[in-house]
Structures are given as structure tokens and as C-alpha cells.
Image (cartoon, coloured by chain):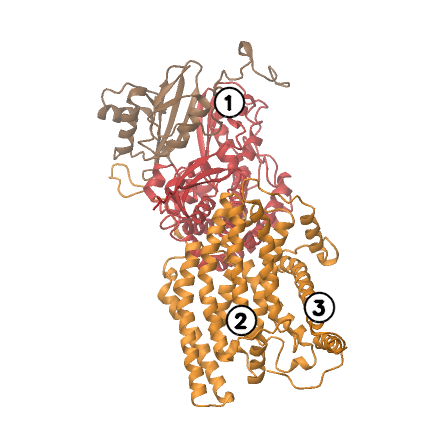
Amino acid sequence: MTFPGPLAPWYDFRDLSNAVERLLSWLSDIGPDWLVYVVSAVIGGTAIFLFVAATAVANIWVERRVVARIQVRRGPNRAGPWGLLQPIADMTKLMQKEALLPRAGDPVVFLLAPILAFGPALLVWGVFPFGKGMTFVDLNVGVLYIIAVTSVTTIVLFMAGWSSNNKYSLLGAIRVIAMLLSYEVPLVLALLGVVLFAGTMSLSGIVAWQHDMRIWLFLVQPLAFVIYFICATAEINRTPTDIAEAESEIVAGYHTEYSGIQFGLFYAVELVNAMALGAIAATLFFGGWWLFGLDRWIPGWMIFIGKVYLIYFLLIWLRGTLPRLRIDQLMAFAWKFLLPLALVNIMVGALEVLLWVEYDLSAGLVLPVFSVVNLSLAVLLVVGWMRFMAFPFHRLPSRARLVHDIPVVAPGAPAGGAA
Amino acid sequence: MTKLIPGSETAARIRAALPDAALEEAADWVVVDAPHLVAVATFLRDDPVLDCRYPTAITAVDRLDHFELVYYLSSLQRNHMLILKTRALDHEAPEAPSVVPVWYGAHPQEREIYDLMGIRFSGHPFLKRIFLWEGFAGHPLRKDFLALPGGQKPGLAHFPKE
Amino acid sequence: MPELRTEPLVVNFGPQHPSTHGVFRMRVVLDGERVVDVEMAMGYLHRSMEKLAEERTYTQNIPFTDRMDYLSAMTGNLAYCLAAEKLAGIEVPERAQYLRVIFAELQRIANHGMAIGIFLNDCGAWQTPVMYMLREREKILDLFEMTCGARLTTNYMRIGGVSFDIPKEFMPQATALVEELPDRIAEYEGLLLENEILQARARDTGILPADLAIASSVSGPVLRSTGVAWDIRKADPYCVYDRMEFDIAVGYQGDNYDRLLVRMEEMRQSVRIIRQALEQLPPGPFKTDIPLALRPPVGEAYARIESPKGELGFYLVSDGGPTPYRFHVRSPSLLNLTPLKEMTVGQTVADLVVTLGSIDINLGEVDR
């Protein structure tokens, strides 16, 4: 899908790709092809890396302040005005700590794990359309690429847990493998529902589909969004599914033995992954950089980052509010609750697309109908399946019973019962 | 109010059921001899009138030439309490039977008495020191542990202004 | 085909751990995630208080009782003073008894707020419930500080009464707190008790059957959660509890959720008691004069109270001298830990931590 229109002047920062396009077209005039390729790779890679680093640093502050507000306290407000220098203080502290290396573990694997964990967090940002032409690499299998890259995290976390030579880490690593594998399946199926409607796996293609149909894919596939959100929360080990690094039980799970900047890398990876979740959801379900025409005045990349932060706020909200689930409850949730829902979602979605294509109906007529049908189906399925599967806790009493007098058996009468 | 069953009443009921248990009675408690302790304890727990199924506190006192084991037993349903005592006569290596088969709540309390007083309980399933480490020399709560020579006590001999 | 050899995993939930409520060690044998055996090792906080107390006078021992259960110091003081008064036959004036009741119940609310918050921390809610419940605890600690000068180790009760009378700022602030607390407790109940994740974690885990609870000397909210209606404030009233109108909270099957319910409801009943005590507070002396070195007659006494953790009892033996001959604490936390193995074997590691949190132990009291 291409966007017609003349090349805007390079200083038009509503679309940062203008400057790059200018530069590249000038270069292709004067130099060989490989120079254009290398220069665009360097510019794009540096931009992505700077963006990810800046995000990781900024999110430390955002997360701590927002979680603190949910917990009726203020959050860091000492280091700089409103605590804005707190991330710098944190990073400096972590960098100057001794990075311990357990001798009896596997030192090479131990050192590699945080670096390899940062890899997928960085790689996944390459395919997002930040603006109209602002994609680093516009792969036509973007969704597949995202899923493949984020699956690498599983083995990396196990590497971290195993090489620490620590039983807590081993417990955390075992839990991580089980959980991440289980939650991959509904996640892929949920994203498949999106791809069914958009007809393409390219991320900018999906945004263009939403732009053309003037509808958010969230409205057409609400169940897919819910399933994706829950599965991705589990994939990045955030509460309520952070059983792998449950602080109150296994100290810190797979990153117990890490200190110094290695721990800082794991911490940054968690934050960047949360933003990546937001970016995927924003692109696939909420229209990416497009917001019903608002992108004529506000630059597309600002809209995109705004949406990402809104979803990130939702993640922080979940973290501050909910307790965590136990590992067997999490696995049961993935396999018995999310997977059937995802399958039903795909079947219904495929049926709808078939009807649409087969009878050549107009989009304006069909999409609102599909939205209504899918929304109500989502609500019905979630509530109904929950009623069917879940333990009827609401029937058990949730208040203690009150006794006014101690029941005392009179002397002489036979005692009976347990008390 | 919880009624404290006087020693005479307890002793009467014990004698009625177990005639050969040697008892001494005091106003508030009954002293039984160590060989009959478990039998008396089982009787006190199973008797429908006394019904002492709840061991409130089990402790020991160092009486300088013997050790005195004190058992505060109560019944929740009847809201009464009675006191049972026994003596461990050898002060150097005292021994007593364990009541863990009768009340499971005696488990940590007897371990504590073994740790701090040195009384060995025969029949205890897991008699190890609970607060101090294995290899600690001595039993701290005995009166002669870290005692000053000549029976002196630390601190002032008398208080000023009295 | 080589033989597959499996061995169970032995993990030390060691003295340093975010969730063992102090320095407490559990040696857990795991088969995957299932707990096969739990062995408790305590004594990391053993300060030999029982031995130290034999060389100090009865009044000098009162600060020791603060530091046993350091999160509910008022009730520790109260139990000891009751035992010493029973031993020496000292009468306590009525105003002092009412003040004792007020402060004991305030301490109960503070303790249960902390206990419920820490329990939810163990369940995984990252300190959010603790922060909410600590708001009320801060106001209660302000009341303590204005009366006796200390927030945590209060050293407030004396043998024969209390050490200070309440200042004039106490009544308005306490009355305001008592007006505000029922709404707050209702807010916490609404936020916490209906949460599905909490119910999935806390229901049907750590079940303690009632007959095992009784045979194990379990007391306090843990005993009441199993369905046994036993509260020393009703069964064996001390101070002026027999003039107070309140109910006791009883659970259903002894799982972690029932303990949470019992503690939540006890906070509300404590508010009732404080309100009545504040209204009925009579004027008069707040302590009786006792000699500096109290010499009770030869004998022994055992006095017990319903502390927030359970039945706290002091067994004092006197030989006529100024110092106790034997000072023994019947510690509720130690005895509540007795059935820990039976409560947790067969469940997962996560449940072990949550169960330990729901028993609400305090290591100062376990180890003394």
C-alpha cells in the first residue's frame, strides 16, 4: 500500500522520514547502491536504539511515579525536580555496583543472558510504523517477525536461571519456560485474527487497512485484543503473571544472582518489553499513527507514542492493583480459558471474512455489523466461559460469621463435636 | 470466667480411673510421678468431664535439686483449666516421658524445654535444639548456668530508698 | 536406556528472605513445585529474655515485653502486668483498666492492618494494600506517641495501672479516628475480599482442621478461622471486657481466606470496643503505688490475654525476692507454627509462602 502525494520538504517534522528520504535520494544520485543501504541502516538503527534507550530511562520514572500514586504515596521526588533525575541516579548506582559472577555456575551463559535478553527487546522495534513512512524495515511478514523475535526470550530467561547455580533461580527458570510456552499459543492465534481481517502481515499494511476502512481493528476483533493483552502480559512477566520473578516467594526468580548493570539490563528489558507490548497493541488494534485524521495537525509519531503510553499506563495499573496468580492457575488459564476463546475467535472471524468477500459486500455496511456482533460475542464468551470453568467462589461466604457468646457445654453434659 | 479446677477434684477423678498413679495434691495443682505421666495425660484428655484437649502451656522450672514440669491444660468446650505437674528428679541428666502422642502442641514446647533446661523427653519424635545450635555447651535456663560463685546474684544487694 | 534419576530439591527459605516475616528459616523439600516436607529452624532472634528477666525486678522487665512481639507491644505489656498483679495481688483502678482496653484494641487494629497488608504482599499485590492500611496505623501510632512517647516499643502499662494519663489532645483525635475507621474497613473489604485472584490464591490453601488446631495449641485468629469460637476476651475476661458489647469473628474451614476474613472483622469489632470504652472512661487515678522493688509472696501465677496473634500468657514464679524466679512466656506465634507442616505439605511453594504469611507470626515472640 503506498501513500500518494509529493515529497514534503525535509523540515516537515510531522513525518520524520522526509529528512531521511531527502538524504537517501541525494545519496543514491551521487553514490553506489550499497552506500544508500548502509547509511539508511545506520541512521535507522541508531534512531531505534536511541529511542529504546530513552524509553527505558524515562519509563523508570514513569513507572515508579504512577505505581506510587496508585499506592497513595508520592514516588521519587528527591532526585531533581519531581524526581526526574531518578532514572539517572538508578542507572549510575547500578553501573557502579560490582557485577558478581558465580564461579560454580556457567559464567559464559551467565554473562550472555542479559545481553541476549536485550536483543529481542531491541529487534522488535524495527518493524513498527512510527509515522506514515517511518518504518525502519517494512517487512511484509511483520507480525510473524514480531512473534518469532519475542519467543527468543523464553530460552534466554532459562539460561539466566540455570547458569546462576541457585535453587531460587532454577525454580524461577522452570516456571518461566512453562508459562511462556503456554502463553505463546493463544497469543499467536489472537494475532491471527487480526491478520485475517487486514489480509496482510505487514504492520504498515495493517495500519493502512484501518486507515482505509476508517475503523479500529479493536472494534472488529475485541476478543483478540483482550486475549493478546493477557498473553503478552504473561510473556513479559508482569503482574498479575509475574510468577517467574515473584519477589515474595523466590526472591527474584531467574535474576536473583544478577547485580550491577546486568540486573539493570534485565530491568530495562522488562520496561522496554512493556512498551513493545503497547506498540504492538497500538499498531494492530488501535490504528498506529492514524487517529481519524488527527494526524494532519499532530505528527503521527506523537500519536503513536501517546497510544503506546496509554497502554503502558494500563499495564502499570494492573501491576499496582492485582495480586499474582499461582503457576498452575496460570497454566490452566492459558490452556483451558484463553486457547478455546482464541480458536472460537478465529473461526468466527474467518466466517465473517468469508461472507464479506464471497458476497462482495461494501465495507461501510459490513464492518459496523461485524463490530457489534464481535463485541457482543466477546462479552458473552468471556462471561459464559468463565461461569462454566471457574470455581463458584461467589457462592461461598466472603465475610466472617459473628458469634456473640462462647458456647460452653454445661458440666456433666457429654462433650461432642470437634471443638 | 475460666474455672480453675482445684487440685483435690482433679486428684479424685484421676484416682478413680488410675488408682496406682502416685499423686500429691496442692490447692491448685496435682503432682504426678513421671512413669504415670502419659497415662494420666491420656486420661485427662479423654475423660468426658475433664476433657482437657487443649494444652495451654507446657513449661519447666529449675528447683535447684530437681526440675518441675508444669502442664497447664484446658478445655475449650467446658471453659475450665487445670494444672498438672511432674518432677524430673535427676538434676544432672533429667528425663521425662513426652506427651507429644497425647497433644501435638507439646512438640515445640518440649523441644524448647530440652534446649533451654536440658530435660530429655523419651518418645519425642524430633528432639533437637530449637533456639540454640547443636553443639552449644550447656542449657542456659538452668540456675547454675553462668552462675556467680557462692550463690551471689548480680546487681545491688538492696535497693536504695527501701 | 539409562535410568532416569530424580531427586527432590531441598531449598532453604533462609533467614534472609522477603517473606518470612523476620529471621525464620524453613528447610523445604520440593518435588517440582509440590512441597514434600517442611522443617522449621528458628532461634535467629533468640535473645534469652527468659533468663535475663530472672535478674531484673518486675518493673524492669516490662520493656522486655515490648520487644517480644514488637508489632503489638501494648498487649505484651498488658499480659505481663496482669500476671504480676495476679501474683502480687494488686488491684488496678478502673480508669487504668479502661485505658488498658483502649490501647490494647488500638494495638489490635494496627497489628491486623499490618498483618492483612503483609499477607497480600505475600500474595503478590506489590505493597498497595499495605500502603492503604498503613494510613490508619499511622494515626494509631500518633495516638501512642502522644500518650507514652513511643510508637513501637511503647512500655506503657505498669504493674498496677498505666504509666501516663492520656493528654487532652487524645480524646478528640481518638474519637475522630473511631468515626472514620468503619468506613475505611468497609473500603478495604470491598477492595480486597471480592478480588478473584485473591480468592483463587487464598481459598482452599493452607487448610487447618479444627481438631488438629486444638491439639496443637493454636490460638487467636488462626483457631477462630477453623470454626472454633474461642476468644479469651469472652471466655476469661480481663480488665473491663465483660462490660463491653462485641462479637467475635469465626471462620469456616481454616484456610488462608478465612484467616483474612477473621482479621478484617476483628478490626471492626475492635472499633466497637474502643468506642464504648471512650464513652465510658471514668475519671480517677490511673495507677496504684507499688514499691520500687516489688516482692510478691511465694507462689506462681499464669495470666493470659487475647493478643492480636493469639493467646499470650505469662507464667511467673516468685520466691519472695524482688526478681522473678521463673519468667516464661506462652508465645502464640511459636505455637501457631506447630501445624505448619500439616498445613502446607502437598501444596505448592507459592502456597507455602502465603500460608506462612496468613498465620501472622512475629519472630520476636517465637524466639524471645
Q: Nearer the viewer, mark 3 or mark 2?
A: 3
Q: Nearer the viewer, residue A132 or B70?
A: A132
Q: How many angstroms separate mark 3 from mark 1 (CA)? A: 82 Å
Relative to C89, say whether C171 is above or below.
below
Instruction: Identify which residue is drawn at 46% across, 85% down.
Output: A369
Q: Position of residue B60 (x, y in %)?
A: 42, 23
Q: Colour of chain A?
A: orange
| Residue C175 visible from this viewpoint | no
Asked which secondary structure carries label 2, the reply is helix
Quickly name the residue at label 2: A143
Quickly name the residue at label 1: C324
* Mark positioned earlier in the residue sequence (3 or 2): 3
Left or right? Give the position of B84 relative to A265: left
Q: How many angstroms separate mark 2 from mark 1 (CA)? A: 77 Å
Q: How many angstroms separate mark 3 from mark 2 (CA)? A: 23 Å
Residue A43 tag number: 3
